[in-house]
Image (tube, coloured by chain):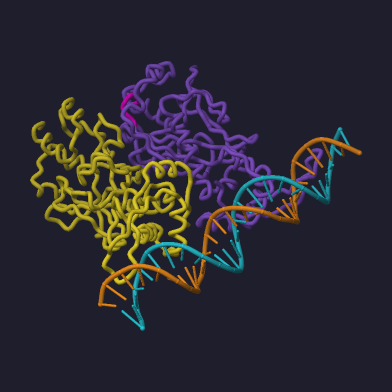
Chain colours: A yellow, B purple, C orange, D cyan
Amino acid sequence: MCTNNTIIISYICTMDDSLKTNHILSLENFLPGQSVDCVIIGYENHELHVLVLKWKNLNIWSLPGGFISKEEDMSNAATRVLRDRTGLKFPYLDQFYTFGNKDRNSGGVDWNVITKFGIEVEGMKKWLEQRFVTTGYFALVDLNECNPQPDFLSDRCEWKPLKELPELILDHGLIIKKALSHIKVQVNYLPIGITLLPELFTMKELQKLYEAILDKELDRGNFQRKMLKLGIFIRQEKQLTGAANKAPYLYKFDKVKYEKILENPHARFN
Amino acid sequence: MCTNNTIIISYICTMDDSLKTNHILSLENFLPGQSVDCVIIGYENHELHVLVLKWKNLNIWSLPGGFISKEEDMSNAATRVLRDRTGLKFPYLDQFYTFGNKDRNSGGVDWNVITKFGIEVEGMKKWLEQRFVTTGYFALVDLNECNPQPDFLSDRCEWKPLKELPELILDHGLIIKKALSHIKVQVNYLPIGITLLPELFTMKELQKLYEAILDKELDRGNFQRKMLKLGIFIRQEKQLTGAANKAPYLYKFDKVKYEKILENPHARFN
DNA sequence: ACAAAAGTGTTATCCTTACACCCATGT
DNA sequence: ACATGGGTGTAAGGATAACACTTTTGT
């Protein structure tokens, strides 16, 4: 049982080195009935995107998630999931809500499907069928720095724009909604731009990002003035767009000043 | 084993009637390694208070908490704990954070003390010693409407002002801190006044409440104007204080208008 | 009369909003 | 020349902050 489990668990959960050497990996090494799910958010083409998994040979989609080793902090489990799916080392990641409804993961999924995945682990099906309480984490990432990797249940790991999200298993759709509304409410306290945009960006791009998060249009001139007044931007030379208009400036963040300003409430967008 | 457990569990967890009739109550009926803790907040004498428990015959203090039945939603467990400790039927209660550090409840407590409590349940000590992930809920209540009741571990259940909190077990101090900072950040979206103050109150009292939550002083005149402009107050006749000054008006909330205003951001206090 | 606290007023300053205007660029 | 979108300007209205003035009440 151990050898088999060791293989599987290395899929479920790429352990930290410290955990690897100290423990035999098997389902008993995880907290029963507890999991983490990650809403990994990126931004491209003026739209927010979420990273989702498609299950092997099936038209079933889910959020990336994982179990919590008895030897690790819960936040570590979330970091692990995020790292395994994206390759990112120092992501922005935070907890936003814990989903504990009794029936949240009963029904909707026939766990017999895992037998088709070539997974033969003693107790695996029973493990997956038990009642789970899951804690939702959200990550803000630069989509272009990610290298999406499917997990042991899935054959695809893809960015989907919010408006084209497939139907997701269980309450994963609700989990995404909750993450987005959390980000919307907390927008003034989160490092939105610095995590979701590439190193260099235009004010227009930053504005479109805020518009996507707040789900409403903002005035161009006012946005620019408000943002620049924060004093956390470094203006670069002009961009040579080749478009039929004035070339916009490129900006990058003054990371030191950004850190300071996040501690206290700053520019407000309502 | 069952009879004994049934008695104990009725202390740990006053079940809903629906649960009572359907299940034999024993430790196996609870989610292992998962709990809820409640930061129950009241307001009196210009200070925020938290409801805490003192363990039987010991100088050990903790937050009221409980376990989650396999047959109930997690939020129901929190409501149950709150109801059992305060008698309140329709409290304002919300989740704010889940604490999942590996070592959060290892060390610090010698669970052998429970043998002194006259509790003899098979596996009880082991149950309490396992690693727990706990979800924090906060409640905003009218302190005068509460009827504090100790649980099976405690002989006292008391309101303590924030500045006179005793040392608490495990990470319960941290849990309170996190709850307070959550309330501070969310203050404009929470029904602060309507839950924490009695039916009738003066503007001065409301101001002192906001000052306690925000931990800073506010200008009297500006506070009054800002609040009243919200249009959610009904002015009553003057109060006959007997103090050597002009008698202040009493107010009560217009609950219908209050509901509406909480949905959208309203008056801001920073 | 006086102190104390309520209720209300005043003013300068800042922020927000909704536009308008000019500038640079490629077709 | 002209359309397109960037950068900046402006003026009205609202919100904020600091403080002053008046009113009520018990001693």
- Whether residue A81 sits left or right of residue A94 in the image: it is left
Quadrant of the frame with the N terminus of chain A:
top left
**x then y, percent, for residue C4:** 78, 37
When the figure is inspected, residue A261 is found, relative to residue A43, above or below; the finding is above
Closest to the observer: B152 or A220? A220
- Whether residue A148 sits left or right of residue B65 in the image: it is left
Residue at point 16% right, 38% down?
Answer: A123
Closest to the observer: A31 or B85? A31
- Whether residue B49 sits left or right of residue B251 in the image: it is left
| Quarter of the image where one finds residue B4 | top left
Residue at point 33% right, 45% down?
Answer: A102
| Quarter of the image where one finds residue A49 | bottom left
Q: How many marks?
A: 0
Is the stretch drawn in magenta largely helix, strand or loop?
loop
**x then y, percent, for residue D1:** 36, 83
- Whether residue B180 sits left or right of residue A166 in the image: it is right
Residue B130 is one of the magenta-drawn residues: yes
Residue at point 54% right, 33% down?
Answer: B50
**x then y, percent, for residue A176:** 32, 53
Q: Which residues are magenta?
A: B128-132
Residue A230 is one of the magenta-drawn residues: no
Res A50 seen here: yes
| Quarter of the image where one finds residue D10 | bottom right
Res A41 seen here: no
Closest to the observer: A218 or A226? A226
When the figure is inspected, residue B211 is found, relative to residue A186, above or below; the finding is above
Closest to the observer: C26 or A129? C26
